[in-house]
Image: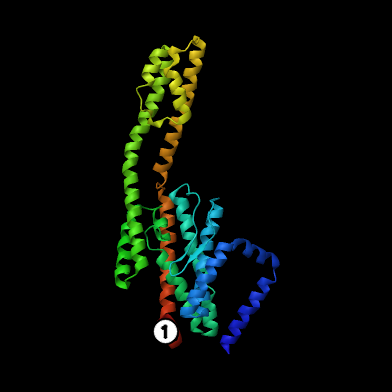
Amino acid sequence: MKNKKAWGVIITLGLLVLSKFKFVLVILKVLKLQTLISMAIYLWMYALIYGWKFAVAFVYLIFIHEMGHTYAAKRLKLPVSPAIFIPFVGAAIAMKEMPKSAKDEAYLAYMGPVFGLLAFLPAFPLYFYSEDPFWALVIFLGGLLNLFNLIPITPLDGGRIVAGISTKLWAVGLIILLGYSIYNFSILGFIITIIGAMEWYRIYQQQKNLVKEEKEVSSYITTNNLLREHSERASVGNFTYHAGSFKKDILDEQLRETFDILNKVEELETTEEQDREIIDEFLLRFDEQVHKIKNEFERKAAYYKTDNKTKLKLFAIYMGLVVFLAASTYFGNSIIMESEEMKRIME
């Protein structure tokens, strides 16, 4: 009797929501064609194996999780692709543009589990009201799905969150995920472990290269300053000689053309005023190029640098999510183990 009442409440609420036509239009706008098609295939495949109730619950939980990332991306004004469902893997949205910092990337990452948590919270009162173990299954799936995503290794959400604290924490994630993959013989787990290890190595190499790039940027700035100083008191020929001493690999196409003209200036029949214009043009373009390289270096160098307050905040959010999701997973699992029907579904 309680089960029927619970489903009656859900259907009533559903009809009330659908009666708001504007809300339906918003949902249809969010659900792009690619999302709808991949979601339908995903739903059908899981329904064949586990039944429709399980499939609908699972797809719902994954979709809300991905909508958390989409919401965060819009707040950060980052363009992303529609969510795509991949059978037996999950779902994902692709970023068309990288966040400006690890702090923004962490925000983008943790909004997935936050929305995921909110998605299954209503299952708690529904279970206590109806005593239907199906709602315990929803709690278990929601907790486990989002808890797995919080393993601290990229490309999982947990790896992107802790990157704002320290990328060294990825080592913990690699150990956890490798242990999980071996224990459960999870092919997907092994794949994510390999991707995570490759990403960690890439960041390690990037940090090493930044030391080298810092010296090069400093050299370019020094050269730029010396050329400007020399241009005020040297002849065109002497300036050309000094300008030829720096590395030309940083010249873009337009600046290279200016440099070629500078090298041929003595062969041209130009006035001193025209020579000065050519030098000034070169200096202007070279200055722009150096600043462009400097800004790009500073952007990369500052990406993983966060203040202590931000690190503490990210750690608190991360641990809060882990504790609540772990408790929810345990709660849902303990009820499922007492229900023969749910055990059959999960087997």
Mark 1 nearby-residue class (10 Å; few <14, some 14–19, many ≥20): some
Is 108 placed left or right of 223 in the picture?
Answer: right
Residue at the image position 54 percent from the left and 78 percent from the top: 125
Is residue 324 in view from this perspective? no
Q: Nearer the viewer, residue 36 or 108?
A: 36
Residue at the image position 52 percent from the left and 79 percent from the top: 52
Residue at the image position 46 percent from the left and 25 percent from the top: 257
Query: Looking at the image, is 229 positioned above or below residue 13?
Result: above
Residue 135 drawn at (x, y percent): 50, 79
Residue at the image position 33 percent from the left and 33 percent from the top: 215
Instruction: Identify the residue position indicated by label 1 in the image.
Output: 343
Q: Amino acid at mark 1?
A: Lys
Residue 109 drawn at (x, y percent): 46, 58
Image quarter in which the C terminus is found: bottom left
Q: Nearer the viewer, residue 31 or 157?
A: 31
Image quarter in which the N terminus is found: bottom right
Residue 45 drawn at (x, y percent): 48, 74
Is residue 107 in view from this perspective? yes
Is 190 placed left or right of 144 in the picture?
Answer: left
